[in-house]
């Protein structure tokens, strides 16, 4: 008696791994990851994007800060599978056409770092801080939180409060505040034109950017 033909064996779908496509700095990356893999580990260990640093690995130090759809997030507490469908921006994706982002340039010009380990997270956080302020988001030290009041002056106290989630063990905080202040003085709109923020009007500080020098 001839035995019936055996059906090809099919392995059940994995319950611990998934294939995800991550949009990172404008490029798509498809990975098979353990469901427990953090976005931080996926960036560093799987995609060699080591600009995002692993510090405390508990969401306390801010060294792993990236942008998710333009908003700040600590990558060590974000699962890679949960980042699918969202735009992830790391420090490697901030420069455009070989030209540093204004925040990167300000940190470089004003020595907003010492050892540099926390700097990528500081820079990503600062980029989001400037946009949050321009959108009128108040902070814990904002005097007038009414929506109609508009963005408060981006004082040093405002910057310190808004950047308080990013720690610098070298204590380069004075230069970091100065760098954020300078970068906030001139923002770049979606068309690539320089526009003055409320901060420039409130403090009278001018950013030393080519656009500002050319207009002087």
Image: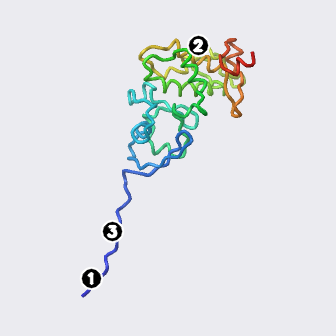
Residue at far left of view:
1
Residue denoted by label 1: 3
- Disc 1 and disc 2: Cα gap in Å? 82 Å
The reply to whether discs 2 and 3 touch (Cβ–Cβ < 8 Å) is no
On the image, numbered disc 2 is attached to which residue? 156
In the rendered image, the vertical position of residue 108 relative to residue 58, given as above or below: above
Which residue is found at the position 51% from the left and 31% from the top?
Answer: 91
Task: Using residue 111 as the reference point, say whether residue 60 is left or right of it.
Answer: left
Label 3 belongs to which residue? 9
Residue 19 on image: x %, y %: 44, 52
Secondary structure under badge 2? helix
Question: For residue 59, what is the image quadrant?
Answer: top left
Closer to the N terminus: mark 1 or mark 2? 1
In the depicted view, which residue is nearer to us: 84 or 59?
Answer: 84
Q: Which mark is residue 34?
A: none
User: How many neighbours does mark 3 have within 10 angstroms: few (below 14), some (14-19), or many (20 or more)?
Assistant: few
Residue 53: x, y in percent? 42, 29
| Badge 1: residue crowd in 10 Å (few <14, some 14–19, many ≥20) | few
Of the 4 image quadrants, the one containing the C terminus is top right
- Circle 1 — which element? loop
> In the displayed structure, does residue 118 sit left or right of residue 194?
left
Say which label, 2 or 3, has the lower sequence index.
Answer: 3
């Amino acid at each position: 008696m001839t035995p019936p033909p055996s059906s090809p064996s099919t392995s059940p779908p994995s319950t611990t791994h998934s294939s995800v496509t991550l949009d990172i700095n404008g490029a798509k990356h498809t990975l098979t990851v353990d469901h427990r893999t953090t976005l931080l580990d996926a960036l560093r260990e799987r995609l060699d994007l080591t600009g995002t640093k692993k510090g405390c690995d508990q969401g306390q130090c801010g060294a792993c800060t990236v942008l998710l759809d333009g908003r700040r997030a600590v990558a060590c507490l974000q699962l890679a599978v949960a980042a699918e469908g969202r735009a992830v921006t790391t420090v490697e994706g901030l420069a455009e056409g070989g030209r540093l982002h204004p925040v990167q340039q300000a940190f470089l010009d004003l020595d907003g770092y010492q050892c540099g380990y926390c700097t990528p997270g500081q820079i990503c956080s600062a980029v989001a801080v400037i946009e949050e302020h321009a959108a009128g988001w108040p902070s814990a030290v904002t005097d007038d939180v009414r929506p109609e009041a508009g963005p408060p002056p981006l004082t040093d106290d405002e910057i310190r409060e808004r950047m308080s989630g990013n720690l610098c063990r070298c204590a380069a905080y004075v230069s970091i505040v100065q760098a954020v202040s300078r970068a906030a003085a001139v923002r770049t709109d979606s068309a690539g034109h320089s526009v003055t923020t409320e901060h420039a009007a409130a403090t009278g500080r001018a950013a030393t950017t080519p656009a500002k020098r050319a207009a002087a």
